[in-house]
Image (spheres, grey):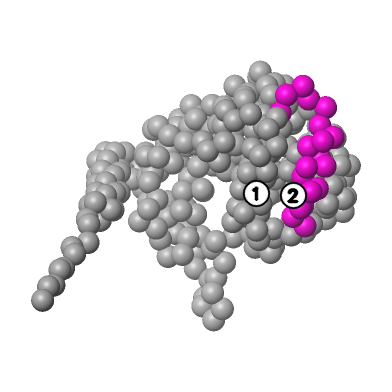
Amino acid sequence: MRECFGGQDFGVAQNQSELIAEVLNNEKVVIAPDVPTAAEIFAALDASEVPALGFEEMFDAFLRAYARKRGRPIWGLKTPWNEFYASDILDHFDDVVFLHLIRDPRQSALSAVYADGGSWFYDPALHVSRWKRSAQLALENKKRFGQRYQVVRYEDLARGPQGVTRGVLPFLGLEYEPGMEAGDKQPGWDGSKSSFAPSPGKKPAGPPTLPSDLQVVYSRRLRVELAAFGYPLPQLRPITKIIGPIAGFLRIASIFLLHRGIAAKRLLASRKTPRLSQSGS
């Protein structure tokens, strides 16, 4: 959305209306409960005490109107990879607090590999590079922004949800409410917590494990970052240490070629023009 509206003058009413209409037509907004009306967003915008309106202020007005409609004093946004923009967000809004949830990447990989019976579109090279940058940003931003940047390990949250929740609330300016750690008041949350829940009538299988070649890939490329967050390296057999890098390279190369093939097929399909047949008497 920023690509379409970035750089526009939002002091102009027409630009405001167009952006608000685009936000309200977003697929995630359409299915959300308690969505504010355009009039309510304009009211939040009028209450803004800023010298100049930009894209960020428009977005903030929408979320403030949403929070008000749900009876909440502040808004929160939960979307993937926000940490890649954390510096810009925290520099722009001086009252924002960032909560960075980090998880052992090998467990995240399991979700991608085994969810819905397996996914050919899981790209270990992309996942490793993203997680590495995310982990580095967690360390850098915590050092730079201090208490405005809270880093929580998923494993700690899963092990003691109430304690971790209570620990971060003071930095968010919120008070604890019973059941808050369960997410039972989050809009759209159905309570599901796992992609590995056994199907009815089937015997529960053992927990899935990451293939040994991927264990080697993650251990080698993320050694420093894993250690920084207390994630242990696996004890691999000597034969795995020898074969693992080769198998990992072949896996990554095959997935890369698969993705390039799909992209090329789509490109060729988009360039094809329908043949027109003409007939005459």
Q: Decide if residue 273 is in sight here.
A: yes
Q: Identify the residue at image location x=55%, y=41%.
A: 1
Quick one: SS at disc 2?
helix
**Above or below 197: residue 22:** above
Q: CA distance from mark 1 to mark 2?
A: 8 Å
Q: Residues within 10 Å of mark 1 (few under 14, many from 20)?
A: few
Viewport quadrant of the C terminus: bottom left
Q: Where residue 133 is drawn, which disc sits there?
A: none
In this view, the residue in front, 194 or 95, is 95
Q: Residue furthest bottom?
A: 201
Q: Residue furthest top?
A: 144
Q: State which quadrant residue 93 falls in.
A: top right
Q: Residues within 10 Å of mark 2 (few under 14, many from 20)?
A: some
**Above or below 175: residue 121:** below
For badge 2, the amino acid type reads: Ala
Task: Check if mark 1's residue and mark 2's residue have beta carbons within 8 Å.
Answer: yes
Q: Where residue 38 is drawn, which disc sits there?
A: 2
Over which residues does the magenta segment extend? 34-53
Direction from residue 182 to residue 10 in the image, left or right: left
For badge 1, the amino acid type reads: Ala
| x and y percentages locating residue 87 in the rendered image | 62, 24
In this view, the residue in front, 67 or 194, is 67
Q: State which quadrant residue 276 falls in.
A: bottom left
Quick one: SS at disc 1?
helix
Task: From the image, tell me which residue sits under label 1.
Answer: 21
